[in-house]
Amino acid sequence: MIIDAITNTYKQHNEDAYGHGVNFAWVIDGALPLDKTNVTPWTNDVTWVGNWWTKYLNTHLQDASMSIQEHLQRGVLKLNEEFKQFAPIDSLSKLDRASFSIGITRLVNEWIECYVLGDIELVLKFKNDLYQTIVDDKIEVLDRQVINMIVENPNRENEIVFNGYTAKELEVLRSNRMKMNSSEGYYILEHDPMVIEKGRYQRFALHDLASMMLMSDGFSAIHNKYKLYSLETLFEKVRLKSVDDIIPILRKKELDDFKTCHRLRKHDDATAVYIEFNE
């Protein structure tokens, strides 16, 4: 396998992360709490938890005697054991908790396993030039409510109250966050091990695949929000050059009025792992 990867942020702390090993790769995309809660000694809890998952996944995922879901469930329990030194898990509301979308792929016995929880986009390119995307769009559906508010408010720059949002936008965001890990909302990685079974899992024969890519929503926007490239063009550009070459194009687009791009934020962390399979 040939692996090319990038994570890029416009700010001091990146809430995205990625990792890969001899038989696996993964991407996570963190979401900050919507209250001003911060219980870890780091700048924010998302970066502390993201760093914890980076070490855990890179250490354990290669062990194919356990399923991806078993690794994640065990990881959540271990995370909770370490995290409780800062605060009891039960004391944190859904507004206080750091949460993550996660996408994982792993090679086991000539099969490529794929797992997605949240809005990480995992795209497979088959040798017959067909593409298949694995993603959960429930978060996008909820975000659309706030995006519409952003687009329709000509005075919002004067109404910002917290983390780049207006009071009315925050009200909707917080209402949606309270639906986290419920059938009324969306499922995502946080402190509940039972949620892992809600992820999307599929496996594919290695001999059928040409390449694949895991993308945080900040990177996948190049094709599904900004419409700058089709999936076919994106894969070809990355194959011929690298994932690094996509970042300047993303950042240049973000300099445009973000209302026209229909996004929650003007900028976003952008992460991708591209894998090309040997013939």
Image: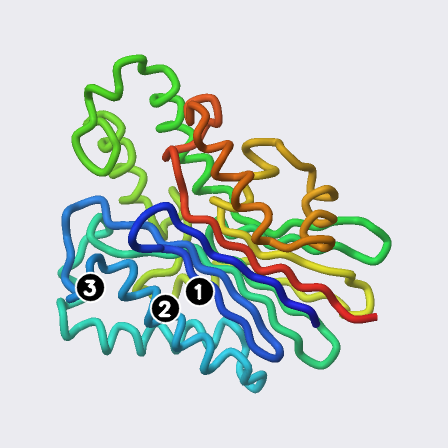
Label 1 is placed on what type of residue?
A: Ile
Q: Assign a secondary structure to mark 2.
A: helix
Residue at mark 2: 193
Tell me where residue 102 appears, x and y as whole percent: 47, 59
- Residue that appears at 49% across and 51% down: 216
Label 2 is placed on what type of residue?
A: Pro
Tell me where residue 156 appears, x and y as whole percent: 26, 19
Question: Label 1 crowding class (10 Å Cα cut-off): few <14, some 14-19, many 20+?
Answer: many
- Residue that appears at 68% across and 45% down: 234
**Pointer 2 with pointer 3, Cβ within 8 A:** no
Residue at mark 3: 42
**Pointer 1 with pointer 2, Cβ within 8 A:** yes
Q: CA distance from mark 2 to mark 3?
A: 24 Å
Q: Quadrant of the C terminus?
A: bottom right
User: Splitting the image into 4 quarters, where does residue 21 fall?
Assistant: bottom right
Q: Is residue 63 above or below residue 69?
A: below
Label 3 is placed on what type of residue?
A: Trp
**Pointer 1 with pointer 3, Cβ within 8 A:** no
Q: Is residue 247 above or below residue 91?
A: above
Q: Is residue 235 above or below residue 230?
A: below
Between 110 and 227, the one nearer to me in the picture: 227
Question: Label 3 crowding class (10 Å Cα cut-off): few <14, some 14-19, many 20+?
Answer: few
Residue at mark 1: 196
- Residue that appears at 20% across and 19% down: 158
Mark 3 or mark 2, which is nearer the start of the sequence?
3
Q: Assign a secondary structure to mark 1.
A: helix
Q: Quadrant of the N terminus?
A: bottom right
